[in-house]
Amino acid sequence: MLALDHVAQSYGSKPVLSDVSFVLSPGQIGCLLGPSGCGKTTALRLIAGFEKLSAGEIRIGAEIVSYPSHSLAPEQRRVGLVFQDYALFPHLNVEQNVAFGLSALPAIDRRMRVAEMLDLVGLGHEAAAYPHQLSGGQQQRVALARALAPRPRLLLLDEPFSNLDVELREKLSLEVRDILKQEAITALLVTHDQHEAFAMADVIGVMNRGVIQQWDTPYNLYHQPANRFVADFVGQGVLLPGNVLNSRQVEIALGVLEGKVDGECSEEGGCVKCEKGCQVDVLVRPDDIIHDDASLLMAEVERKAFRGADFLYTLKLPGGGRVLAQVDSHHNHAIGERIGIRLGIDHVVAFRK
C-alpha cells in the first residue's frame, strides 16, 4: 500500500533524508520513530505531497505519486491526515467537522457516513458539540473520524497524541489502533515516543540523522537492536564490557552468556564479525536481571525508582559495574542493601568496542 524507494531530501546543501526505503502492506500500521530533527516529519510531508523529493520515488497502492520531476497533488493522493494540534474548525460543530471532506456525496449519504464515523470513535452523542466543548482526547477522536470519513487509502498521523497527558496518550493510542485494525486502514505514525510507537505499530523504523537505522517489529527492536543507536534509543539498559570466547559464548562480569555473537551492525548498514578474543560491549536490559534471594551473586542497591507495579533498581556489581533491574514492587529494598541477582538473558546483543 505504501513504498518508499531510496528516497532522499535536501534543503539547499543540507541533507535531511538519505536513502530511505520501506514498505507497508495493506492494513499494516507503521511508525517512524526518532528524536527531534531526525527527518521523520519530512518523510511524512513527502508522502502527503506537501514537499517534492530530491531523489527516489514514493508509491501509494500501484501508483507512483512522487519522483524528482513529478509530484501528484496532495488532494489527489487519497491520503488522510491527523495532526498534532487536531486542526479542527472552531466555528463548526463535530458533525460539520467530520463532514468537511464529504461535500461530493449526496446529503443523505454524507449524514450516514458522518454518523458511522462518530459511532466508530465513540462520539455519536457529541455530534452537535463544538471543539472547545470537548476534551483533548475527544478532539483527537473527531480529527481521526474526519480523516477516515472520505475512505483514504492511507492514513498519516503526525505526533497525534503529544498534546495529551501520559495516561490518556497510552489509552487513546490503543483505541486508535483498534479502530484502524477494525477498518483495515493502512497507516503511518510519526512520533518520538517509543511507548506510543510500541502500542500502535506493527513495524517501526528507528531514524537518526535522516537514515532509518532499523526497520523491524517492536519486539526485534527491543531484543535485537541493529546498532548502538537503536539499543540506546529503544528501551532502557546498560552496556557491560565482555570478552568473546567463541562464536556462541561471551564472558561478562556476571558470567558467561550463551548465544550467537555477531558483533555490531553499523549505522551505515555493515556488520562486523567478532571472533575469539574480540572485546565487546554487551547490552543488558532491566528485564535481563532477575532478583533471586537464593543467588550467590550479590549487588548493592544504589538507586531506586518506584513505578507502581515494579521498582527500577540501579545495582552496583562487585566489580564496580552497574546494571538496571526491573523488580516486582513487593520487593522494596533500601538504598545500600545487597540483594541476590541472576542473569535471565536468552540471547546475546554485543557491540564491538
Image (spheres, rainbow, N blue to C red):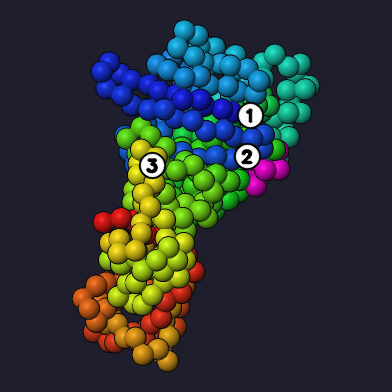
**Which quarter of the image is occupied by the N terminus?**
top right
* Closest to the observer, 129 or 160: 160
**Label 3 residue SS:** loop
- Rendering coords of residue 129 (x, y %): 59, 35
Give residue 338's quadrant in the image: bottom left
Q: Which residues are magenta?
A: 178-183
- Rendering coords of residue 12 (x, y %): 27, 15
Q: Amino acid at mark 2?
A: Gln
Query: Are dots 1 and 3 in contact, CB under 8 Å?
Result: no
Query: Are dots 1 and 2 in contact, CB under 8 Å?
Result: yes
Q: Amino acid at mark 3?
A: Gly
What secondary structure characterizes most of the magenta part? helix
**Label 2 residue SS:** loop
Give the spatial CA distance, label 1 vs label 3.
29 Å
Q: Looking at the image, how many numbered discs can be counted on the residues?
A: 3
For the question of whether residue 158 can be seen, the reply is: yes
Residue 101 in magenta stretch: no
Q: Is residue 268 left or right of residue 141?
A: left
Residue under the image location 44 percent in, 30 percent down: 20
Whether 238 is drawn above or below 207: the answer is below
Q: Which mark is residue 28?
A: 2
Residue labelled with disc 3: 270
Q: Earlier in the sequence, mark 3 or mark 2?
A: 2
Give the spatial CA distance, label 1 vs label 2.
9 Å
**Label 1 residue SS:** loop
Residue labelled with disc 1: 1
Residue under the image location 45 percent in, 66 percent down: 248
